Image: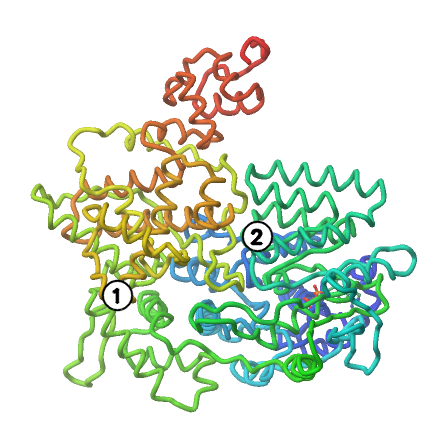
Amino acid sequence: QPSSLSGLPAGVGEALEAEGVAELYPPQEAAVEAGVVDGESLVAAVPTASGKTLIAELAMLASIERGGKALYIVPLRALASEKKAEFERWSEFGVTVGVSTGNYESDGEWLGSRDIIVATSEKVDSLIRNGAPWIDDLTCVVSDEVHLVNDSGRGPTLEVTLAKLRKVNTGLQTVALSATVGNADVIAEWLDAELVESDWRPIDLRTGVHFGNAINFDDGSQREVPVDRGEEQTARLVADALDTEEEGQGGSSLVFVNSRRNAESAARKLTEVTGSRLTTDERDRLRELAEELRSVSDTDTSEDLADAVEQGSAFHHAGLASEHRSLIEDAFRDRLIKVISATPTLAAGVNTPARRVVVRDWRRYDGDFGGMKPLDVLEVHQMCGRAGRPGLDPYGEAVLLANDADGMEELFDRYVWADAEPVRSKLAAEPALRTHVLATVASGFAATREGLLSFLDNTLYATQTDDEGRLTAVTDAVLDYLAVNDFIERERDEVDGTERLSATGIGHTVSRLYLDPMSAAEMIDGLRDACADDATNTTDAMPAESGEYERVAPDDADGEPGFGTYSPVGDADDDVGDADDDTDDAAGEEDGKRTDITPLGCYHLVSRTPDMYELYLKSGDRETYTEICYERETEFLGDVPSEYEDVRFEDWLASLKTARLLEDWADEVDEDRITERYGVGPGDIRGKVDTAEWLLRAAETLASDVEGIDGDAVLAVRRARKRVEYGVREPLLNLAGVRNVGRKRARRLYEAGVETRADLREADKAVVLGALRGREKTAERILEHAGREDPSMDTVDADASA
Ligand code: ADP
């Protein structure tokens, strides 16, 4: 039993032993020696799968034992519930866990009663902005994958959030878990923490490059893997791992590729390798799994995935529904699925060790770069780190692929022998500072320009920069922007000359809504513009629905540039519609409503904000969308840029493509058609829909807070929002708002003559059951949600209804 665990609840040592932790791993031992159980801050920079989570758990348990409260910041939303489930095994010691996944909660007050809270950095940021009362009570914060501060999209949020937490709670224990990076010491300096840095791994890792007829490993050894003419290196390597595993246990592989499409086609190809190597029992189980995958959603992706999985091969990328992903991950860990072809998302995410990792693509398309760009060393090392299953493999093998001797040399230099890059703060950029400066002022972290600059001094940026003036310059530019758009007010004190800063009412709203101020400005301008054109302009804005809305979607970057995000809701399921009783008003108001603000106009408005990830224009798209742009010119809120303003016009068209996707969804176009038409996965549709819904909701709130936007405009936005939320045309809104109904069922009920919630309460049960394809449980639930007195289907003859 680990001896060094005093300070933890009695029995933790035995519990760990029971789950196979006979002794601490060396980096864990070092962390304990550095005082992590005694409340010391710590940066642990150690390889993937070497037990970082347990270091964090020891810190949190000890902190809770001392009467404190812990926050665990996860890098991906998809990991939040997984971590929660992991930590819940401590409930036998009275430890409670809450997860804040971040759809439409308010300040998460209920989390105040939990000992451990799990959330993404964006969610924590949002909770701070909304004044969550328990933030002050935290005694321990864990930042998982802290090297993500290097990411220009999400890094600044993590950086500022940690700085805020540490400012509110002096003496807050900060435990930062990092992959091995070039400058962990700088992170430790920033966080005022002890540093544990190690290359130790529980299983040896051999990294090598395959070329010709062998893998050449870093330790000088070789493994013969001859590739026949016409055969692919990857397929050969996967087959080799499966065939040579000891004890008859098939050795599974992970194949990393650079795009979703490649993941799907690689998985299809690899069925040729796996399909012939399955036992009868495996075949049966895989067939069952395939059925389950198909039932998750009724789409081509789902179908393709199931087809491949039947043969023991799967793909994994951020376009999959979360249910798909977890089914695949579980089956891979159970060794039922023999190979997963994945985009890099998987490397950063869940625990899916494999016997062999094949890094097939080490370059990927980068839109900003305008071509293929080599992956970071850090990323490739993380992929390689997935090799080696504890307890199963003597060692793990990670293999890169080369075509010739020079290529092999290059890969050795570039990745095998290379150290991971240092992380660099990306804070001093306008898009990042726009939102964080406003939030910092609005939440009272700074009341003057000097106070703001001194707050920013607590960031990693300040720790590592040698250009002190830059942060100040960008901050000043951002302050100007925020003042011009009326989000903040500046006042110079006549006496001492200091500049006082405060957020305006609308500035507070923007901060709480978790909007990029530029998104807010774009939406306000667009709506004002539409109202100014309108002769019947009135100023009595509709009150928006109460409640605070938080950022829904783009907080789970997935390492795939240019693509959408993990679906925040998770499954592309039709049944997510909530019993929002106010759907009645949206459907009912035909009189006096303006006709000039259309759903497409609203969708385009939100699609061109920086908070929406646009779809890329593919070849031929420019012509298609230019045509649509002119056909529907009157619908846009705001002025269409000239075709000669190349970049702006191109952006406008990309937003139009996104808007058209949303319009299709709201027009009840089939999910399959949409995935095909726009080249996206079902998870992407869900992501875009959720982001649009969040932004339109935010637009409603903003519209009622500012002058110059009339009530009719707000109604038009609300209607557009509800249509995209439920994915239905106007007449179906009322019905689709009933819980468990959703877009497809709403359409079938409507066709059967059941047109409203009220109809559901009166309709012939056999008709309802028929429209719902004889599913009694579903029918009962729906009738109950519609408020029917007697929802029971017991008396209905199902056959008669069919
Ligand atoms: P990391 O977060 O560093 O990627 P994990 O914390 O997920 O790695 O650990 C990988 C695996 O090692 C987990 O399954 C965990 O239960 C196991 N593990 C961690 N510490 C020990 C230990 N001291 N002894 C045995 N197994 C351990």
Taking the view exactly as shown, the residue that stands out farthest to the front is 229
Ligand 1 in which quarter? bottom right
User: Could you tell me which residue is drawn at 55 percent across and 55 percent down?
Assistant: 318
User: Could you tell me which residue is drawn at 65 percent across and 49 percent down?
Assistant: 326
Position of residue 607 measured from the top left corner of the image (x, y, whole percent): 33, 54
User: Could you tell me which residue is drawn at 40 percent across and 18 percent down?
Assistant: 754
Direction from residue 622 to residue 62 in the image, left or right: right
Which quarter of the rendered picture does the C terminus lie within?
A: top right
Position of residue 452 measured from the top left corner of the image (x, y, whole percent): 33, 77
Q: Residue 726 carries which label?
A: none
Q: State the SS at label 1.
A: strand
The image quarter containing residue 796 is: top right
Disc 2 residue: CB within 8 Å of ligand 1? no
Q: Residue 503 carries which label?
A: 1
Mark 2 is surrounded, within 10 Å at the Cα level, by few (under 14), some (14 to 19) or many (20 or more) other residues, namely many
Mark 1 is surrounded, within 10 Å at the Cα level, by few (under 14), some (14 to 19) or many (20 or more) other residues, namely many
User: Could you tell me which residue is drawn at 70 percent across and 46 percent down?
Assistant: 309
Q: Residue 98 carries which label?
A: 2
Position of residue 770 measured from the top left corner of the image (x, y, whole percent): 52, 16
Direction from residue 470 to residue 595 in the image, left or right: left
Relative height, residue 173 to residue 621 (above, below): below
Q: In terms of sequence position, does the residue under pointer 2 or pointer 1 come before the other?
A: 2
Q: Can residue 152 be seen in this view?
A: yes
Q: As shown in the figure, which amino acid type bears the numbered disc 1?
A: Ala
Position of residue 383 measured from the top left corner of the image (x, y, whole percent): 66, 68
Most foreground residue, 310 or 167: 310
Direction from residue 523 to residue 552 in the image, left or right: right
Which quarter of the rendered picture does the N terminus lie within?
A: bottom right
Relative height, residue 480 to residue 737 (above, below): below
Q: State the SS at label 2.
A: strand
Relative height, residue 797 to residue 12 (above, below): above
Q: As shown in the figure, which amino acid type bears the numbered disc 2?
A: Gly
